[in-house]
Amino acid sequence: MADHYEVLGVARDATTDEIKKAYRRLARQLHPDVNPGADASERFKSVTHAYDVLSDAKQRDNYDRGGNGHSGGGFDAGNFGNFGDIFETFFGGGGTSRGPKSRRDRGQDALIRVELDLDEIIFGTHRDLEVDTAVLCTSCSGTCCQPGTSPVTCDICHGTGSIQRAVRSLLGNVMTSSPCGSCRGYGTIIATPCVTCQGQGRVRARRTVPVDIPAGVDTGLRLQMPGSGEAGPAGGPNGDLYLEMKVRHHDVFSRDGDDLLATLEVPMTDAILGTTATVKALDGDIEVEVRAGVQSAEVITIKDRGVTRLRGNGRGDLRIGVHVATPTRLDHKERELIEAFAARHKSPAPTLSAVQQGLFSKLRDRFRG
């Protein structure tokens, strides 16, 4: 058997890069597609086998110590070839070329969080979002090449993107196919990459994404914007952009489904006599009728003044919980009037009651503080 170093024409202390360069030089001369002669074909097999051994550190070490150049002790793996290649040949089409792979690929999806105020979700809102992402390179328009140039066909695989090799096996010589190491399976080489994108076909930049956020969204909801994510390599299609909603806390109003909740503090005298109050809602003023004798924890419902439904028509309601405010400081005259009132309307002793407890529990957070 010929010495592998002599076959490649390199010294025994040659580096991995020197071995690779020698193989590429010889492969250009001896490849069957370039040199169809029988002698060239045999030399190409020898060169390929020598490169397979010397390019692998473990096999090279074994070869330098007098072995056959393959791992596995006394088992001569070289006589049986690569079992993975054999299986690929018969079950995956390793002996046939599948064609070069494309540089174009789909871009990554992106996720950003959008914070909204409660009043913005009643009718929906518009946002112009600034997104830091990958965009198409305007210098090369995604070709990856310097303007005025184009990819050149790989001179190793001649544009196929793969290299075929003859491997000895139990079944005789079989042809296996592996990605070309020169062009990495693309079939072409970018000889003069675009200086703007470094041959990627895309660059990082900030761009504005206009978004119409529908009414009725809530915290945690995600909106998908197809094609608004990162641009793909080499002019590939954009990924998708996902917007995750977060509704900020409001000091006055809270949300219960499509309804809005609020608390109305009513002075004791107005609770006794009844009154009309003008309150500022999220979408304008509202006249609230407070009946005479209203009690704390009663709920006044204002129809169709809640949140617009996300899926469906109409709006929810505005539910206002009443909190009767008892005065804590009375002057002498006010106290006499209250005492006279109490004397005329003798009330039973205070007792625990479950009346309206369910309604009160929904608004308990509003009554604290």
Image (tube, rainbow, N blue to C red):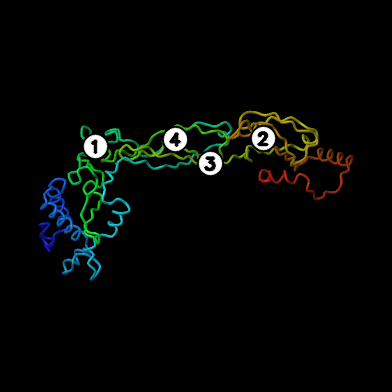
Seen from the viewer's position, the closer of residues 103 and 343 is 103
Asked if residue 261 is positioned above or below residue 64 in the image, the reply reads above
Mark 2 nearby-residue class (10 Å; few <14, some 14–19, many ≥20)? many
Seen from the viewer's position, the closer of residues 21 and 291 is 21
Q: Which label sits on residue 48?
A: none
Q: CA distance from mark 3 to mark 1?
A: 41 Å
Q: Cβ–Cβ below 8 Å for labels 4 and 2? A: no
- Marks 1 and 2, the one that precedes in the sequence: 1
Asked if residue 256 is positioned above or below residue 148 in the image, the reply reads below
- Quadrant of the frame with the N terminus: bottom left
| Element at label 2 | strand
The residue beneath circle 1 is 145
The residue beneath circle 4 is 129
Mark 1 nearby-residue class (10 Å; few <14, some 14–19, many ≥20)? many
Label 3 amino acid? Leu
For image coordinates 24% across by 60% down, the residue present is 169
Q: Cβ–Cβ below 8 Å for labels 3 and 4? A: no
